[in-house]
Image: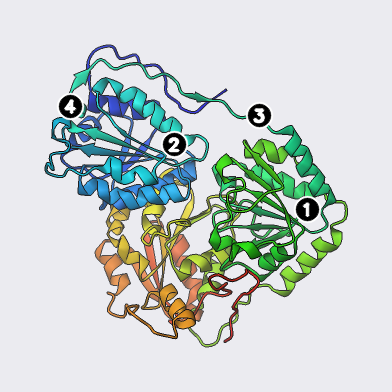
Amino acid sequence: MRPASHAQPLNVREPVSGARLVVEALEREGVRHIFGYPGGAIMPVYDALPGSSLTHILVRHEQAAALAADAYGRVTGEPGVCLATSGPGATNLVTGIANAFMDSVPMVAITGQVAAPLIGTDAFQEVDIFGITLPIVKHSYIVRRTEDIPSVFAEAFALARSGRPGPVLIDLPKDVAMTAAVPQEAEPVALEAPALDEVALAKANALIAQAESPILYFGGGIAIARAERALRGFVERSAIPSVATLKGLGGVPTDAPSFLGMLGMHGTRVANVAIDNCDLLICVGARFDDRATGKLDTFAPRAKVIHIDGDPAEIGKLRRAEVGIAGDVTAILDRLTAIPADAEAWKQQCAEQKRMWAMSYDAPGNGVYAPALLKQLSEAAGDRAIFTCDVGQHQMWVAQHCRFARPQAHLTSAGLGTMGYGIPAGIGALIADPEATVITVSGDGSIMMNIHELATLRRYRLPLKIVLLDNSQLGMVRQWQELFYEENFSEIDLTDNPDFADVARAFGIEAFTVDHRSDVPGAIRRLLETAGPILCHVRIDPRENVWPLVPPNHSNVQMMEKTR
């Protein structure tokens, strides 16, 4: 048996307000930081915060609270906690909650609610957040009785952490928060880890030993399970070439000799070709997402599949597996000890193709070439860097060209694709790991979604390094319109955006602009050496596309590649 909650028995025996019980429940769960924004229905909880051990981070929009909590959960492995009032406060959390759900991030979202007698009366700032969030949480609670608060919170945190992690919502009516009651003791919640399937392990080892052209395909489940040590041990033992999903980057260092890069829509040519030619696909902590597989029935067409995941529901969901093993990913990888007996020619072929098809960083003109800038920045920032990315062309450039030495060094909205994730995620990452060098890479479209969080950076003096790649348009939309919509460039123009360096300075953030390639080395030094928050506004060629690209409903080997 393993504990899934840190809850300890209560010592409180005198009546205590519900709000005080909320604070004590958070403290018992080991929570140190919460991200939130106060309002009427949640005010009793805010009234109970002073004097507690909790540090509250006041953001400027509830969506940012949820996104910061998301990043905090990714970095720490513990549930990120966000707090909002009823009505619009609660609905503003929804995108961040959905983001955590799609990317399997542990989170507990706490919302105020109108007093219980008013629920269902269309009271001021009443919204059925319980019902709204049902499709995007592991569980939703409405706390009906003050004395139930300790047990509800213990169960919520256990659910957020256990199995496939994810968000849990707790909706707290104002009268429940204000009423005093003698709490019921919270029973520690424990979940039994399933036994390993010995027959499946034996079959998996046999398939590995027989394989002539195996590939290891791993995803975000490695970070979720904290299984990077076991993954790297397996790679070192077997020397099997490996590829990663967007969320898997860093599971093994991206400059490891046998690592072939990210696969999928914007993956490397060598990764996609290797998958197409392999005879055994060892899938660990990945879910055969369409952005990774391309047209699913063409993915790894000649391969037998071993599928390993912490979530049994993923095994065989999209691709039939010859061997499926659900459970503790670390324990499973440690038991995969077979070594392919006849795969040396395959390994040499993959290594040669990796060298032959390496990314090029040559570009015409004197302007800044974003891939080259990001590669140089990553090399200068070192292994302690964490990149938080918004969504768009810049997201893919970071994934393709930056070096990641560990899991969760690349925080991005992979499943939901949330523009505006970058700065709030940078806030959450810095609160979780103050010693890390945290770099947010954004675009001129994405940054406007949550640009107000520059005020949060200033308030807490968080040394976030922001690289804003500005092509004066919605770049990824423009690229798709160019390639797939006959160059019908509809509603992508952002040339009337403000001067972003001026905007940052208005928030009290140091900022500067880079236009020329020759200025890049100095810009990187300034960015990394500045003690506080700083924004580097980089103007790039609006015609630059992300390459390679697999068109929709095509095989991953049907890649479109750079032509100019």
User: Which three-letter amino acid code belongs to the residue tagged 2?
Assistant: Ala
What is the distance, in whole Å, between disc 1 and disc 4 at their CAs? 60 Å
Along the line of sight, the residue nearer the viewer: 232 or 555: 555
Residue located beneath label 3 in the image: 195
Q: Which mark is first along the chain, 2 or 3?
A: 2
Is label 3 in a helix, a strand or a loop? loop
- Provide residue 239's location: percent of width, then percent of height: 78, 53
Which residue: 37% across, 57% down? Answer: 423
- In this rendering, does residue 57 appear at all? no
Looking at the rendering, in which quadrant would you find the C terminus? bottom right
Q: Are marks 1 and 2 in contact (CB under 8 Å)?
A: no
From this viewpoint, is residue 228 visible?
yes
Amino acid on which the number 1 mark rests in the picture: Ala
Question: Looking at the image, is mark 4 or mark 2 earlier in the sequence?
Answer: 2
Q: Quadrant of residue 172?
A: top left
Marking on residue 239: 1
Q: Earlier in the sequence, mark 4 or mark 3?
A: 4
Looking at the rendered structure, the secondary structure element under dot 4 is: helix
At label 3, the amino acid type is: Ala
Q: Find disc 4 in the rendering and name its residue.
A: 178
